[in-house]
Image (tube, rainbow, N blue to C red):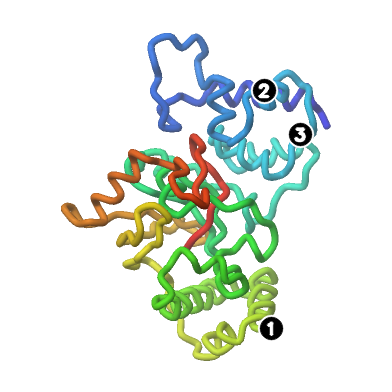
Amino acid sequence: MNLRELAAFLKTCRARVRPADVGLPAGTRRRVPGLRREEVAQLAGLSADYYTELERGRGAQPSAQTLAALARALRLGGDERDHLFHLAERPVPAVHGTTTHVQPSMLAMLDRLVTTPAMIITDLHATLVQNDLAAALIGRHPMRQGPRASYVYRWFTDPAARALYPPEEHPHHSRVFVSDLRAVAARRGRDPHVAQMVAALRRRSAEFAALWDTHDVALRRADHKRLVHPVLGIIEVDCHSLFSEDGRQRLLWFTAPPGSQGAAQLELLSVIGTQDMSPEGAHVSGPGVNADASTG
């Protein structure tokens, strides 16, 4: 691994990102032209000490997940992201999974949704990045690789994944997930990752197999949801989607009608944030934009 070149590249990229580009205040006592080291670390979900060691050309080889998080924090373009992976001697990720490169234009939109729960997911419902309010609303989940990165896959294979929605609404969400996945599968053509995921779900879930055989198809562009929050109870929200040009990424954001109970709950959520106020410790605190929660 070319530690010296990696360090120089990180420094250069950090220097050219303006705080406003990532939703941070410029401040009046800023002595560097771009972001501070601790700000990059915060945005990437890393410790400041670890990131500082990277910029000094020392430390452990960063993982693919760490590199992907740094690429998002520094708002790197596709070629720049690939260069970062090459310098770290890591394989450049394919266009699927949680290390997928988030399109800068989608990140720019997410940065501006500071008062709204919002997140970016792939078309297979693997979460790439979320803001703090989205984490407060739906919680954080550990990073996953392979099919389990997809919330759709976990929905049909892990009962715990359904705790986000009231049980009586599970059949509705199952139908919506399957019809959305069929639309994605058709658009992707003979994508082996989609084919493998569908085959695995057919083997593991009779419910999925039965719904898949109905051949219902519809992209999930908007939906009204009732979310189960461990502190605030049922929160009714409207979920909206903005699709990237190639359809492989989606910006989701959650709203509630002004004056509604849901709007009041979202406002309260912005106050309590991701503080752990439940006996079970369902939510954990954490700053910045994170890439470790999933929903659809």
In depth, the one of 213 and 133 nearer the eye is 133
Residue located 77% across and 47% down the image:
91
Q: Quadrant of residue 62?
A: top right
Question: Disc 1 to disc 2, how far (Cα)?
Answer: 45 Å
Give the mark toward the camera: 2 or 3.
2
Q: Earlier in the sequence, mark 2 or mark 3?
A: 2
Q: Quadrant of residue 169?
A: bottom left
Categorize mark 1 by other alpha carbons within 10 Å: few (<14), some (14-19), many (20+): few
Give above or below for 224 relative to 285.
below
Q: Earlier in the sequence, mark 1 or mark 2?
A: 2
Mark 2 = which residue? Answer: 49
Categorize mark 2 by other alpha carbons within 10 Å: few (<14), some (14-19), many (20+): few
Label 1 secondary element: helix
Mark 3 = which residue? Answer: 87
User: Hey, which residue is sitting farthest front in the picture?
Assistant: 279
Residue located 74% across and 41% down the image:
63
Label 2 secondary element: helix
Indicate the amino acid at tag 3.
Leu
Indicate the amino acid at tag 1.
Arg
Mark 1 = which residue? Answer: 203
Indicate the amino acid at tag 2.
Asp
Question: Disc 2 to disc 3, how far (Cα)?
Answer: 20 Å
Q: Earlier in the sequence, mark 3 or mark 1?
A: 3
Question: Disc 3 to disc 1, how far (Cα)?
Answer: 40 Å
